[in-house]
Image: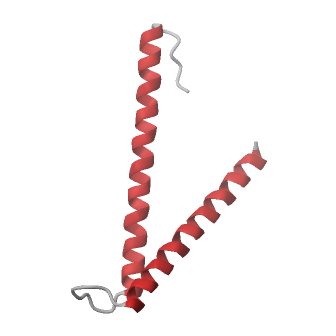
Amino acid sequence: MDNFDNFSASEKAEATELQRMIAIEQQKAQFQAQVHSFTDVCWDKCVDSPGSKLDYRTETCLVNCVERFIDTTLAITNRFTQMVQKGT
């Protein structure tokens, strides 16, 4: 964490809370970017021509695509976490 030695106790608490809130907003933004990413990828992969509603094949393709995208993202994240933990 940053150096808050010259801050009062209340200023330190406010700064810490602000950092926490910024981290949460960054996580939200990252999640939203991931949603947009797999939406683009899966839409291009599964939707031949948009209509008034999805047919069964398209819906199944989209569900499977999103599930694989999430599984892959989690696997990569877990692997990086393991690598970081081994490096410390």
In x, y percent, where is residue 72? 59, 70
- Residue at 35% x, 87% y is 47
Left or right? Give the position of 74 relative to 45: right
Quarter of the image with the C terminus is: top right
Left or right? Give the position of 20 relative to 50: right
Q: Residue furthest front?
A: 56
Quarter of the image with the N terminus is: top right
Left or right? Give the position of 29 relative to 79: left
58 in relation to 77, above or below: below
- Residue at 37% x, 75% y is 40
- Among the 4 quarters of the image, the one containing residue 79: bottom right
Q: Nearer the viewer, residue 69 or 56?
A: 56
Q: Nearer the viewer, residue 6 or 44?
A: 44
In x, y percent, where is residue 85? 74, 47
How was this image coloured?
secondary structure
Count of numbered circles on the image: 0
In x, y percent, where is residue 15? 43, 22
11 in relation to 63, above or below: above
In x, y percent, where is residue 80? 66, 56
5 in relation to 28, above or below: above
- Residue at 46% x, 32% y is 20
